[in-house]
Amino acid sequence: MKKTIALLPGDGIGREVIEVTVDVLKTIEEHYHHQFQFQYGLIGGDAIDQTGNPLPKETIETCRQADAVLLGAVGGPKWESNPVFLRPERGLLAIRKELDLFANLRPIKAFDSLLDSSPLKPEYVRGVDFVIVRELTGGLYFGKPSERTTQDGEEGAVDTLFYKRSEIKRILVSAFELAMTRKKQVTSVDKANVLESSRLWREVAEEVAKEYPEVTLKHMLVDNAAMQLISSPNQFDVIVTENLFGDILSDEASMITGSLGMLPSASLSSSGLHLYEPVHGSAPDIEGKNVANPIAAILSAAMMLRHSFGLEEEAGAIENAVKHVLGSGKRTADLAKGGPYVSTKLMTEEIKAALADDHAILNIMEAYA
Ligand SMILES: NC(=O)C1=CN([C@@H]2O[C@H](COP(=O)(O)OP(=O)(O)OC[C@H]3O[C@@H](n4cnc5c(N)ncnc54)[C@H](O)[C@@H]3O)[C@@H](O)[C@H]2O)C=CC1
Ligand SMILES: CC(C)CC(=O)C(=O)O
Ligand SMILES: [Mg+2]
C-alpha cells in the first residue's frame, strides 16, 4: 500500500517522539511491504521561528495532500511572552479548525504490566478500557469574544463558551457510533447545573440517544466525573464531553495508565483526512534529554494505520509489540517510579525488535500452515 503521511513534529519532545515513531513506521513499511512517503510541515514555535506564523499555509497544503497527519506537540517557554496570536498553541487550534477535526478520540487502556506504575491501586486499574470523545473545534478555546475588558471600572478578561446545536449533535453521534462497537454505554459529561451550554448539550444528548436504543446514556457533572475517574474508572466505556472538560479529564485519566506519555489520540474530521497526536504537550522540562516516553506517539501511529489506512494487522502488531516490551519490564523514566529506565531511543529499539520478532513468528506460522 502507498500512503503519504504529513509529519508535523512541532516543538520540544514533539520532535523527539515523532522522530522515533517514523522509525517504527519504517519498520512496518519494511516488514509488510508498504510504501509510506513522509512530508514534513512546520507548526507551533518552530514555525514561528522559521516563518513568523504558527501555522504557515504551506503546512495546511502539505496536510491536505496527505492521506493522514501525524503531529508531535507544540509550545514552550521560549514563546510564552509572545502576543496571543503568535503563541505556538494558536497553530494547533488553527489546524484543528482548518481541517475540521471535531472529534478527538482518546483511548484509556490499562496495560496489566503497568499496574504498579499507576498511582491508583491495582484493583482499580485492572481492566480499565474506555475512550474519551472530546469535542475539539468549539467551546471555550474558540469562543468570541476572548479578550481583556473592563467591568465596573476594573480590568478583567472574558472567554466565551459557545456551541451550536449541530456541533453538539455531531460529536454525540460520534460517541454513540463508537459505543455501538463497544460496551454500548455513553457517559455524557457536562456542568448542566450551572451552564446554559451544558443544558443544551444534555438536551441534544437525549435526542441523539433516541436514535440508539441499544446504548445506555448516563449524564454526569464534570466535577463528579473527575472524582469517579479515580475512584471507579472501570465503570466507563465511552465518555463524551466538550473541549475544555475533555482536555482536563484526559490528562487526569492518563494516570490510570501510569503516565501522560502513554495516551495516544485520533482527531477525526468528516472529510476523511484525520490527524493523530499524542495527548501530551511539548514537555519543556524533559526536552532534549532522550527520556520522553515515545509510546503515546507510537500508539497514535497505530491508530492512524487502523483508522486512516485500514491496516488492522499492522496496527495490532505495533500494539502487541508495545505490550510485549512493557511486559518484559522495560520502562521509560515516567513509568519507572525511580527504578531503572531506558531512553526514548532504546524503548523504540525494543519496540522495533518486538515488531520484527512478531513478524518472524508470523512468517514461520504461515510457512507451516
Ligand atoms: N498537543 C499539544 O501540542 C499540547 C501542547 N501543550 C503545550 O506544551 C507546553 C508544556 O505544557 P505542560 O503543561 O508542561 O504539559 P505537558 O503535557 O507538556 O507536560 C506535563 C508533564 O508531563 C510530562 N510528560 C508529558 N509527556 C511526556 C512523555 N511523553 N514522557 C514523559 N513525560 C511526559 C512532562 O515532562 C511534564 O512534567 C505548553 O506550551 C503547552 O501549551 C500542552 C498540551 C498539549
Ligand atoms: C493547546 C491546547 C489546547 C493543547 C492541549 O492541551 C490538548 O489538546 O490536549
Ligand atoms: Mg491537553
Image (cartoon, grey):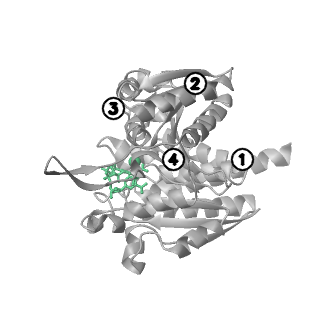
Q: In the rendered image of this protein, does residue 125 appear above or below residue 169? A: above
67 to the left or right of 10: right
Q: Residue 19's spot in the image, x, y percent?
A: 50, 65
Q: Residue 94's spot in the image, x, y percent?
A: 47, 61
Between discs 1 and 3, the one toward the N terminus: 3
173 to the left or right of 287: right
Mark 2–mark 1 distance (CA, rounded to whole Å): 37 Å
Q: Nearer the viewer, mark 2 or mark 1?
A: 2
Residue where numbered disc 4 is placed: 264
Residue where numbered disc 1 is placed: 313
Between discs 3 and 2, the one toward the N terminus: 3
Q: In the image, what residue type sits under mark 2? A: Glu
Indicate the secondary structure of the residue bearing disc 2. helix
Between discs 2 and 4, the one toward the N terminus: 2
Residue where numbered disc 2 is placed: 206
Mark 3–mark 2 distance (CA, rounded to whole Å): 35 Å
Q: In the image, what residue type sits under mark 4? A: Pro
